Image (cartoon, helix red, strand yellow):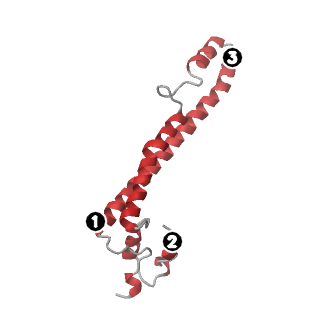
Amino acid sequence: MSDDAQASPRPRPEGVDDQTVLAVGRLTHALETVNRARGYLYGFHELTGRADNELDEVLQLFRDAGHDEFAAKLERDLLGRNVIDDRWTFQIVDDYDTGYYALFTDLEQEARDTFCQGVRHLREAEMKRDRRTPGDPNHTLKPDKDHPK
């Protein structure tokens, strides 16, 4: 096999074994899943806030239709209501970000720094190396050669 076939876009730091690469890679994948969940949480936050803002128009429409009592009930019971005990959605997002999410990202970074010299996506870089066809322009190793950690 040529040197090019052995190369990796992100060489494995010396002394890092397969199990460690797999463990760190799986932790990174779990963090990617958490990032997707966080996106859904922000979507929940945005959509809930948008619905609450739409209630201003809804209240006026009910009043214009002569349904003042129902408009007053919506305004009193629903407009600005906490979505869970004592919290609006921004507070849920804030608690998630400063608690679970911050810890998860910190520990994933610590694992990469401790076991892989900070190299990101080492497992995927090795998969790229293993799955490429050397010499095929659609299977090049670059531009990752000098990719920052």
Whole-number angstrom distance, CA of label 1 to CA of label 3: 66 Å
> What SS does tag 3 mark?
helix
Residue 1 image point, x, y percent: 34, 87
Q: Is residue 93 above or below residue 53?
A: below
Residue that badge 2 annotates: 147
Q: Is residue 66 above or below residue 104?
A: above
Q: Name the front one of labels 3 and 2.
A: 2
In the orientation shown, which residue stands out farthest toward the top?
69
Q: Nearer the viewer, mark 1 or mark 3?
A: 1
Q: Position of residue 97 (x, y in %)?
A: 49, 44
Q: Is residue 30 left or right of residue 74?
A: left
Give the labeled residue for mark 3. 63
> Tag 2, which secondary structure?
loop
Q: Are marks 1 and 3 in contact (CB under 8 Å)?
A: no
Q: CA distance from mark 3 to mark 2?
A: 60 Å
Task: Name the amino acid type tagged 1.
Answer: Gln
Which of the two discs, 3 and 2, labels the residue nearer the N terminus? Answer: 3
Residue at left offset 29%, top offset 69%: 18
Q: Is residue 14 above or below residue 63?
A: below
Q: Position of residue 118 (x, y in %)?
A: 43, 65
The image quadrant that residue 2 belongs to is bottom left
Q: Looking at the image, tell me whether mark 1 or mark 3 is earlier in sequence order.
A: 1
Taking the view exactly as shown, the residue that stands out farthest to the front is 114
Residue 80 placement (x, y as % from top left): 59, 25
Q: Label 2 is placed on what type of residue?
A: His
Q: Residues within 10 Å of mark 3 (few under 14, many from 20)?
A: some
